[in-house]
Image: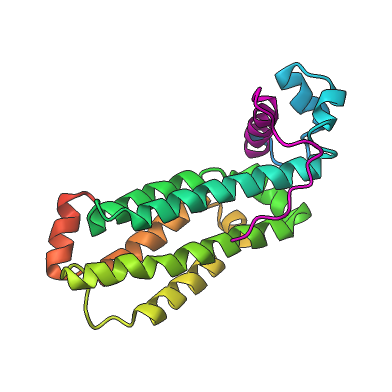
Amino acid sequence: MRTRENKAVSQPDGSGLGQQIVDRAREQFIARGFNTITMDDICAGLHISKKTLYTYFRSKEELFEFALDQTIAGIEAEFDGIIKNTRLGVLERISALMDLEKRGYSCLSRPLLEDIRRYAPAAWERITAAKSHNLKELSVIIDAGIREGLFRPEMDVEMGLNLYEELIRAALSPDFLIRNNYSAAAVNSAILHLFLRAMLTDKGRATARQKGLV
C-alpha cells in the first residue's frame, strides 16, 4: 500500500526527537484512543514545548496520520521480508507471519477502535487496504506449501484468498469487534488458524503440530 504523502512541517531529524514524538503519540493513541489525546499531553510526556512539537506536526490529526502510515509501512516491509525469506521453510514463514499479525493487531486497543469508528473511518480503510496487499502476497507461500506436500493440491488458491479477505473484512471491522467485545488480535488469530487447518494435508498437519501451529 502506498502511504499518504507526509505533510509534516519537518521530517524527524537525526537527533531522534521527531521519532520520539511519533513513538510517544502512538503509545498515547493505543492506550487512550485518539479523541481524548491533546498536543499538550504529547508535549508533557516528552518535556517539550508546543512550539517545538509544531515544527514537526501542524495538528494532532497530522501526527496521527503520520504514526499510522509509519506503522503500516513497517508492518508491510516486515511482511514482505518474511515472504521472500526462502531460508525459512513454509511453516516457519507462516509462523513468523502469524506473530507479526498478532503484534500488528495488538495495537488496535478498544479505545482506539472506538475513536476510529467515530472520528477516523478513513484510517480503517487504510488498514484494510494494507491487509489486502499482504494477503495477495500469501500465494507465494501457499504455492510452495503445495509443492512440498504440506497444503492440499486441489485447493483453488485464488478463491481461497478471496474468501479469506472477505471474512477478514467482515470480522475485523470496528463495529463487529466492539459489538462482540473481541480483540482484533484474537479474531485475526482465530481466522488464520481456521484457514491453516483447512489447507493442511495429513503430512502438513503432522508437521504443523510439531511446530505448535495447530
> Which residue is farthest top?
47
Query: Looking at this rendering, what residue extends furthest in the right direction?
Result: 51
Determine if the magenta segment contains residue 7: yes
- x, y percentage for residue 109? 59, 43
Q: Is residue 127 above or below residue 146?
A: above
Q: In the picture, which quadrant includes the C terminus?
A: bottom left
Q: Is residue 13 above or below residue 182?
A: above
**Is residue 71 in sight in this rendering?**
yes
Query: How many discs mark residues in the rendered view?
Result: 0
Q: Can you give x and y, in whole percent of width and height, for residue 104 in the image?
A: 50, 47
The answer, for residue 214, to whether it is visible in the render is: no
Q: Is residue 101 left or right of residue 110?
A: left
In this rendering, position of residue 124 left or right of residue 205? right
Residue at the (44%, 71%) spot, across then down? 164
Q: Residue at x 56, y 43 (%)?
A: 107
Q: Determine the image quadrant of residue 161.
A: bottom left
- For the rendered model, the colour scheme is rainbow
- Residue 206 percent location from the top left of the image: 13, 60
Give whichever of 197, 86 is nearer the camera.
Answer: 86
Q: Position of residue 17 (x, y in %)?
A: 69, 24
Quarter of the picture containing the N terminus is bottom right
Q: Residue 202 in magenta?
A: no
- Quadrant location of residue 120? bottom right
Q: Is residue 88 left or right of residue 8?
A: left
Figure quadrant of residue 27? top right
Q: Which residues are magenta?
A: 1-30
State left or right for residue 89 relative to residue 12.
left
